[in-house]
Image (cartoon, rainbow, N blue to C red):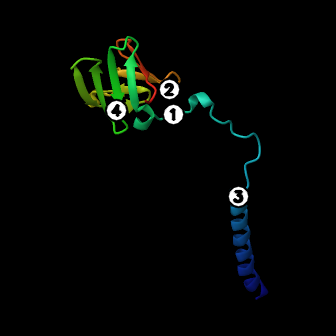
Amino acid sequence: MKMKKILPSLALAAAVLAGCLTVSCKNNPKTGAPEPEAPAAQVETTLTYADLAGIYDDEEQESRVCLFDDGSATWNMIGSLNYAEYTYVIRGNGLYFDNEEATGTPDYTYDPDKKTLTESDGTVYTLQPEL
């Protein structure tokens, strides 16, 4: 008869102990060597329209690309009536003016260190200081 009373108590004690061990394992850090962190080179930055917004002029001051923080862009010949409006998408460091073909070669490649756009034909546009 004593065994019938002790058995449920032991089962309850075992369940409580198992629960404590499970919680204890979840709250304690793993022992052993720490997991290596990802190198900084593998961290991918995501550019936004606000990051790229500004006026970019080519080196000869002949053409200008204006990128706006709403995803729209303009291109024009400086001192001319040649003007075009676009919407663009960003994939990595590439800008695509044709949203349906945003998987091939980008129309422009952005260099965040130099603050430049390089057109697919090699023309470099530099971000102009704000006036």
Asked if labels 1 and 2 touch by Cβ distance under 8 angstroms, the answer is yes
Q: Residue at x 40, y 36 (%)?
A: 49
Amino acid carrying mark 2 in the image: Pro
Secondary structure state at the residue bearing disc 2: loop
Percent x, y of residue 92: 44, 29
**Residue pointed to by mark 2:** 112
* Front residue (pair 48, 7): 48
| Figure quadrant of residue 126 | top left
**Residue pointed to by mark 3:** 27
Secondary structure state at the residue bearing disc 3: helix
Q: Residue at x 23, y 23 (%)?
A: 83
Q: From the viewer's perspective, is residue 49 above or below residue 94?
A: below
Percent x, y of residue 127: 44, 24
Q: Name which of mark 3 and mark 2 comes first in the sequence.
A: 3
Q: Nearer the viewer, mark 2 or mark 1?
A: 2
* Mark 1 vs mark 3, CA separation in Å: 32 Å
* Mark 2 vs mark 1, CA separation in Å: 10 Å
Q: From the viewer's perspective, is residue 5 above or below residue 51?
A: below
**Residue pointed to by mark 4:** 89
* Mark 4 vs mark 3, CA separation in Å: 44 Å
**Residue pointed to by mark 1:** 45
- In the image, taking residue 82 as reference, residue 90 lies left or right, namely right
Q: Residue at x 40, y 33 (%)?
A: 53
